[in-house]
Amino acid sequence: MDEINSNRKHDDSQEQIISNFLIDNYFRKINSTARLIYDDYLQKHGVDVQLENNNGNTINIDVKAQSSAKYINDPRPTFVLELSSYNRYGTKTFVGWFLNEEMITDYYTFVWIHSATVNEKGRIEKVEDIHRLELMTVSKSKLKDYITSLLVGTDVNTIIDEMRANEETRRDIINGVHFSHSPHLPEKPVNIVVHKRILEKFSIGKTGRYFVTKEGIFAPKKYK
């Protein structure tokens, strides 16, 4: 088996429930052409939702949620951009979705779950269990260009190699952006952790950041 991690199938099932919640309570309310994607090829290439812009062009959106049980009802003010992992046996390296050139994603919709009913394992079982989400839809290209611009004199792959070689667990880039390495895990993942206030710079919409409930879509106050 070549899983990136043993919890991925659980996280995927949570994100499918979240996508189903968002298609009716968010995406179709802001764009009537929005549709969920069930095609395996498109899903594997970073497309959960498609919609058409004003010019009739198709926009591919990848829904990324803090869907682990420990973050549901207790979200962190950051988001993890996956860069590189081994499988749990340490025999194969996987390129994370943020670096994978095969992904055809145009935008990420990052999701934080503030209120949901969960089972005894801390997982959401159905769409009706979701009560309040926070989200930003962020330009993939602008976010990648920004991260690249911060790495003066080096690049992402060099940092990944250096952190693994030295078992370095954290490398700060600027306030709100840092690399994270977990050498104690079998997968030894290296990721970039980005604060919401940074992500918001590259988000779309009048305010960029929204709370979504069954009752409607609400714009929160800006960060200080």
Image: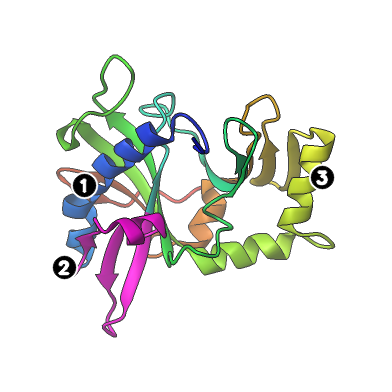
Dot 2 amino acid type: Ser
Examine the rendered structure and indicate whether residue 200 appears above or below residue 184. Answer: below
Residue type, label 1: Asn
Residue 38's place in the image compared with 172, above or below, is below
Asked whether the residues under the numbered discs 2 and 3 touch, taking CB atoms below 8 Å apart as contact, a structural biologist would say no
Q: CA distance from mark 2 to mark 3?
A: 46 Å
The quarter of the displayed image where residue 9 is located:
top left
Question: Left or right: 198 with respect to 134?
Answer: right
Q: Where is residue 117 drawn, in percent x and y?
A: 23, 24
Q: Secondary structure at mark 3?
A: helix
- Magenta residues, as a range? 33-62
Upstream in the sequence, badge 3 or badge 1?
Answer: 1
Say which label, 1 or 2, has the lower sequence index: 1
Front: mark 1 or 2: 1
Q: In the visual, does 135 lie left or right of 39?
A: right
Q: How is the image coloured?
A: rainbow
Say which residue label 1 marks.
Answer: 20
Q: What residue lies at 37% left-to-right and 49% top-to-bottom?
A: 135
**Pointer 3 and pointer 1: residues touching (CB < 8 Å)?**
no
The reply to whether residue 85 is visible in this rendering is yes
Q: Is residue 178 left or right of residue 78?
A: right
Q: Secondary structure at mark 2?
A: loop
Give the CA separation, mark 1 to mark 2.
15 Å
Q: Which residue is mark 2?
A: 32
**Residue 48 lies within the magenta run:** yes
Residue 162: mark in rendering: 3
- Residue 122, position in %: x, y? 33, 20
Q: Position of residue 59 (x, y in %)?
A: 34, 71
Residue at x 18% of width, y 33% of height? 126
